């Protein structure tokens, strides 16, 4: 199957990179997933890697480009983008390949093949997709993050589940399926966002994804740097709800439920998930 045309920029030699991917759309509530990838790019000074042509991926009546006024009032058209960046991290740490994009309307299988080709070009050893969905969680508590992988050995090592969802899927589900078929290690992280706070960017959900990515993959994310944004977000939500007694009572019920449930803690044998990931990927490299 032909891949989607893309422009490849010079890419540095990367140290055992991890490819982190998120798409705006149905599975990016609160812009938490794309916000996490954008944060990683900013934290680690992401550099252009590949510009994927949007022409065959989108129905522009459904995902319309935007007109902006640029320098000196010149009009610019911003097309929906799926651009890959790369970033060097700390010495001896895994480097990053990053994609914060827009879920295409069309040609998902061809697009997945394109991403798989970029996995080969960049020497990626692990693909991690990020997502966020609405859930029955209170904004005043930590947001749960679910991890899954289609690789049975990796699932056992990390103490996470294999995907069990059945029903309509998005591009991430399609991509994860393709990666598994081609024996490319991958996993998915998905955070729950309070369903009664629709639309607004959620730095708290973004930080939850980043913290779990750091725990699992050992990649420095500087998620603590979002603390001020999280406090401001919580204050705005609190202010929006202060006069609504029904919603306040509902949130109190959610808090009680959250407090009565055990905190989601990943079980990876000796408890060091990053070490388990390293061991798993090292064994694969030795076998390859």
Image (cartoon, grey):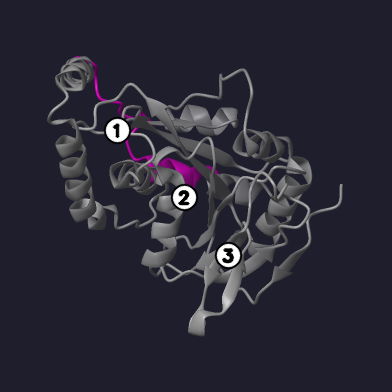
Q: Secondary structure at mark 1?
A: loop
Q: Return the residue at label 3.
A: 67
Q: Return the residue at label 1.
A: 143
Q: Earlier in the sequence, mark 3 or mark 1?
A: 3
Name the image quarter holding residue 174.
top right
Q: Earlier in the sequence, mark 3 or mark 2?
A: 2
Local packing at callout 2 (Cα closer than 10 Å; few below 14, some 14-19, many 20+) is: many
Tag count in the figure?
A: 3
Instruction: State the separation of the CA atoms marked 2 and 1.
Output: 17 Å
Image side of residue 173 versus residue 22, left or right: right
Q: Residue 44: x and y, percent?
A: 40, 67
Q: Which residues are magenta?
A: 260-280
Local packing at callout 3 (Cα closer than 10 Å; few below 14, some 14-19, many 20+) is: few
Name the image quarter holding residue 17.
bottom right
**Comparing labels 3 and 1, the label whose residue is closer to the camera:** 3
Eyeballing the image, is 2 above or below 50?
A: above
Q: Secondary structure at mark 3?
A: strand
Q: Earlier in the sequence, mark 2 or mark 1?
A: 2
Identify which residue is drawn at 61% across, 73% down. Answer: 11
Q: Are marks 3 and 2 in contact (CB under 8 Å)?
A: no
Q: Return the residue at label 2.
A: 34
Q: 166 or 240: nearer the eye?
A: 240
Eyeballing the image, is 23 above or below 16?
A: above
Q: Is residue 275 visible?
A: no
Local packing at callout 1 (Cα closer than 10 Å; few below 14, some 14-19, many 20+) is: many
**Comparing labels 3 and 2, the label whose residue is closer to the camera:** 3
Q: 56 or 246: nearer the eye?
A: 246
Q: Secondary structure at mark 2?
A: helix
């Amino acid at each position: 199957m032909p891949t989607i045309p893309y422009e490849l920029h010079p890419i540095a030699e990367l140290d055992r990179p991890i490819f982190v991917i998120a798409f705006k759309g149905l599975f990016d509530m609160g812009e938490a997933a794309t916000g996490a990838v954008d944060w990683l790019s900013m934290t680690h000074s992401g550099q252009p890697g590949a510009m994927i042509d949007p022409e065959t991926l989108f129905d522009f009546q459904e995902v319309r480009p935007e007109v902006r006024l640029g320098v000196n009032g010149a009009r610019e058209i911003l097309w929906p983008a799926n651009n890959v960046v790369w970033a060097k991290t700390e010495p001896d740490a895994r480097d990053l390949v990053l994609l914060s994009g827009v879920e295409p309307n069309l040609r998902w299988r061809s697009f997945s093949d394109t991403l798989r080709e970029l996995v080969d070009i960049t020497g990626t050893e692990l693909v991690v997709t990020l997502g966020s969905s609405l859930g029955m969680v209170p904004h005043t508590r930590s947001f749960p993050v679910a991890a899954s992988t289609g690789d049975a050995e990796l699932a056992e090592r990390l103490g996470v589940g294999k995907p069990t969802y059945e029903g309509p899927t998005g591009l991430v589900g399609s991509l994860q399926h393709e990666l598994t078929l081609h024996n490319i290690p991958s996993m998915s992280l998905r955070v729950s966002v309070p369903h009664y706070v629709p639309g607004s960017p959620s730095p708290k959900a973004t930080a939850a994804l980043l913290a779990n990515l750091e725990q699992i993959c050992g990649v420095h994310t500087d998620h603590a740097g979002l603390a001020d944004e999280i406090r401001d977000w919580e204050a705005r939500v609190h202010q929006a709800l202060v006069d609504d007694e029904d919603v306040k009572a509902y949130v109190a019920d959610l808090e009680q439920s959250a407090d009565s449930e055990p905190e989601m803690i990943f079980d990876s044998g000796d408890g060091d998930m990053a070490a388990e990931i390293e061991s798993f990927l090292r064994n694969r490299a030795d076998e390859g």
